Structures are given as C-alpha cells and as structure tokens.
Image (cartoon, rainbow, N blue to C red):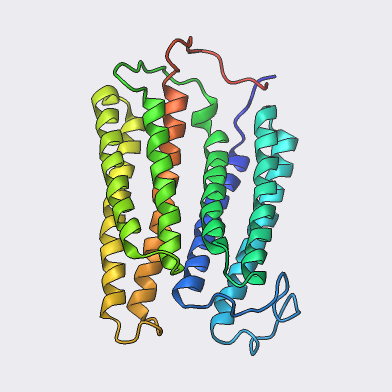
C-alpha cells in the first residue's frame, strides 16, 4: 500500500505545532507572573469547569487559560489521531500518533501533580521538560505528513569522522538538558550558573553541528536551512537570555515582576522551545536525507506502509 500525501492532514498537523507554541506562551505567562498555584484545585478551577471572571482575577486567569489551551490541544491531537488512523497507510505513524495522545494525557496528569504536590519534588521542571518532548513529537507529526517527507529524496553521502546522525542527536540531547536547567532556574530550584554554563554548551555544540553540516552537505538546501535555523535561533536565544536576566537584576522589587521582565522571560522561554524544536528538525532532516553508513538508499520508490 502506497502512502499518499494528504494536504489537509498536513495543514492540520502544522496548525497543531502553532497551537503548541501558543501553549508555551500561556505556560510562560504563568511562571513569569508568579501565578503558579493561583488555582488551588485540579482538574477543575475553583471546583468549576467554567469559573466566573471574578474567580479568575489576578494570576488565576493565567493559570486557568493555560489549562484551557492545553485541554484544546489534547482534543486537537485526538482529532489528529483519528484522521491518521482513517487516512494514513503507514502503521508506524498511526502508533506514533497514539503515543503522542498518550503523552499529552500523561502531561496533563503531571501538570495536576504540580498543583497537588505544591510545586515540590522537581515536578515543575519535569512538567516543563515533558512539554518539550511533546512539542518534538507534534513537530515530527507535521514533518512526517509533509509532501517532502513522503516523496523520494536524493540520498546524500556522509563522509567524515562521527556520523551526522550522531552529531545531530548529540546537539538535540544537549539542548534538552539545557531546557531542564532553564526550568530549574526559572522555578528557583537551581542557581543561574548551571543554566549559563548550559547555554555555552548549547552554543558550542550548535556551532560544531552547523560546521559539520556546512562542510559535508553545503549543496543540500534542506540541511543548509537546518543549520541556518540553528544559528539564528541560538543566537537570538543567547541575547534574550542576557536581556531577561538583566530585567531581573534591574527590577526594584524582584517579587513583583515588571512588564519588561515578563515579556523578555516569556519570549526567552518560547524561543528556547523553538531552539529544541529546530534541533529535532535537524535530526529528522539528517535521517531522511542521509542513509546510515552501510545502508542501501532507496532513491525512486515512495514510502510504503510497514
């Protein structure tokens, strides 16, 4: 059975990626405004599914909005899973989509534990990190349903020391570790210096990855786009990190976040998610275009269901 490109399914998958970015904005607004635990119960808010605007005054508005946007994401992902099982011939993609739905459910439960356990036991950090994993999975769905992924692509030869697959995975892993360090600092469970050191590690590994991509695959427009995206987002994130930390130091009362502190922290957090997403995208590009060493590339046949 041959896999056919479904434009509606792909566009819906891209919309899910955009909705997940909106969810990151909502989550960052919760932490940046000190609104965590503004709603004391879960899964309802103040014992209601639809609390009044009076009950949502102050930080409760950010917390409840975050829950609503996350709930909508769960519903959208279920719709995506149904569509994939209805129209997709690739069995592995069907099961991947179900795993993504299960991951969103697990993330919701973990978010509830953050409230129930009152931000203890590194649960906020785990919640933030698992959110990045789910973002990576949703991004993968958008790539897997694209015409580019389904159609045959010219195979690129990887010559050099460490394989480009391993380098791309190392880049993604280092970026993910930095996500945890950033979440730990943001939730005041860790000082600034591990996060600062992690940012330098991400910068170094990114430069290494981009240099290898340029040296080995300069003629590939897809991998050129990947390394350019890494350069742009990591550079932007470094500047945003400095600006966000400066806004904390410049605040006369650190317990009352200023508008500049909130804006810079939210943008810094969201761009951090995009940096991790770009590292996942580079991994996908490498595995799609560059056959593993010793493997025989298939150049002419489209992907078939397994």
Residue shown at 39% from the left, 81% from the top: 257
Residue shown at 52% from the left, 37% from the top: 143
Q: Is residue 113 above or below residue 262?
A: above
Residue placed most toward the observer, 178 or 23: 178
Residue placed most toward the observer, 256 or 283: 256
Q: Is residue 15 something one can see in this rendering?
A: no
Horizontal relation, residue 106 to residue 173: left or right: right
Q: Is residue 59 something one can see in this rendering?
A: yes
The quarter holding residue 251 reads bottom left
Q: Is residue 17 above or below residue 4?
A: below
* Residue 284 x %, y %: 47, 33
The quarter holding residue 3 reads top right
Residue shown at 46% from the left, 68% from the top: 187
Horizontal relation, residue 77 to residue 231: left or right: right
Residue shown at 32% from the left, 46% from the top: 202
Quadrant location of the C terminus in the rendered image: top right
């Amino acid at each position: 059975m041959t896999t056919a490109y479904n434009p509606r399914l792909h566009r819906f998958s891209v919309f899910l990626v955009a909705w997940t970015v909106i969810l990151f904005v909502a989550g960052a607004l919760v932490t940046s405004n000190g609104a965590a635990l503004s709603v004391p119960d879960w899964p309802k808010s103040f014992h209601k599914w639809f609390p009044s605007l009076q009950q949502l005054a102050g930080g409760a508005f950010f917390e409840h909005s975050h829950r609503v946007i996350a709930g909508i994401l769960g519903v959208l992902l279920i719709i995506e899973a149904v569509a994939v099982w209805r129209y997709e011939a690739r069995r592995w993609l069907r099961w991947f989509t179900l795993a993504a739905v299960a991951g969103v459910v697990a993330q919701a439960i973990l978010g509830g534990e953050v409230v129930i356990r009152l931000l203890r036991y590194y649960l906020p950090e785990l919640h933030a990190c698992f959110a990045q994993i789910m973002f990576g999975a949703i991004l993968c769905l958008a790539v897997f349903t694209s015409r580019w992924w389904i159609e045959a692509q010219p195979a690129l030869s990887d010559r050099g020391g460490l394989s480009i697959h391993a380098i791309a995975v190392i880049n993604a892993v280092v970026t993910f570790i930095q996500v945890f360090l950033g979440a730990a600092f943001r939730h005041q469970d860790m000082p600034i210096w591990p996060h600062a050191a992690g940012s330098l590690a991400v910068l170094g590994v990114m430069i290494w990855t981009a240099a290898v991509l340029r040296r080995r695959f300069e003629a590939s427009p897809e991998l050129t786009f990947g390394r350019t995206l890494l350069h742009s987002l990591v550079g932007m994130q470094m500047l945003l990190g400095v600006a966000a930390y400066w806004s904390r130091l410049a605040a006369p009362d650190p317990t009352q976040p200023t508008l500049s502190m909130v804006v810079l922290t939210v943008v810094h957090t969201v761009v951090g998610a995009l940096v991790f997403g770009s590292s996942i995208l580079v991994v996908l590009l490498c595995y799609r275009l560059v056959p593993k060493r010793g493997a025989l590339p298939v150049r002419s046949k489209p992907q078939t269901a397994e």
